[in-house]
Amino acid sequence: MELLITGTNMEITTVIHQYAERKIGRLHRYYPGIIETKVEISEEKTRSPQHHYLVRTTIDGNGAAFHAEVRGEDLFRAIDKLAAVMARQLKHYKGKMYDRDKGQTVRSGQPAEVAGEEEPRGLVKVKRLDIKPMTLEEAAAQMELLGHDFFLFHDADTEETRLLYRLKDGNYGLIEAPRGRRIKYG
């Protein structure tokens, strides 16, 4: 892993460089696919002392990019905080890759299919319903009885299929298709 540390409006002393190298250099243990890490440390003249130092990092993770920035009053605490933020991001990403690959971890230097993108979702379940004609009131009662948040039914009054659903405030909403008109998409 290549680590580049630069400074803006300040000199990066040996102590600062070694500290950042030690803290940021540990990140490869959370995700071994890290190729390059860039750290930019800058000192800014602000009214708020909490924003005196800005520490940014960009990590090239073999096709996946990670970025974070932290502001702080104390430079070393800001570096610590940045390392913690990046560790969380890398652990989360590695976990997603582990789950996506169905139990196979991502190896160093080998991207998992298309890193950073989730697989497209597909249809995983089909449910067939025996839809009986009923009134809107009967559909609402049936939905309550089943404890569902929505209910598909054939309206006995209009002879159309409708979807009854519960709103966040407890009231109901109704979705109905326009009668006799073709719907154009695109």
Image (spheres, grey):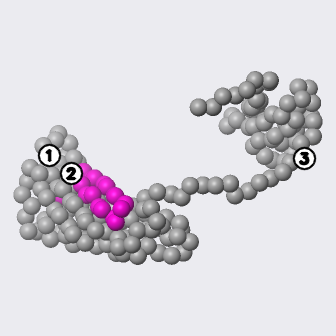
Residue at horizontal 41%, vertical 76%?
107
> In the image shown, does 159 or 14 lie closer to the viewer?
159
Q: Position of residue 24 (x, y in %)?
A: 25, 67
The image position of residue 147, as x and y in percent, is 81, 47
Q: Is residue 138 magenta?
A: no
Q: On the rendered structure, is 128 left or right of 118?
A: right
Contact flag, marks 1 and 2 (Cβ < 8 Å): yes
* Residue labelled with disc 2: 54
Q: Amino acid at mark 2?
A: Leu
Q: Amino acid at mark 3?
A: Asp
**Depth check, front residue: 140 or 184:** 184
* Position in image of residue 174 (x %, y %): 76, 31
- Residue 11 in view in this figure: yes
Q: Nearer the viewer, mark 3 or mark 1?
A: 3
The disc at residue 126 is none
Q: Which residue is painted at 14% across and 46% down in the image?
A: 44
Q: CA distance from mark 1 to mark 2?
A: 7 Å
Give left or right: position of 148 versus 19: right
- The residues colored magenta run 56-75
Within-10-Å neighbours for mark 1: few <14, some 14–19, many 20+: some
Which residue type does callout 1 highlight? Glu
Residue named by callout 1:
44
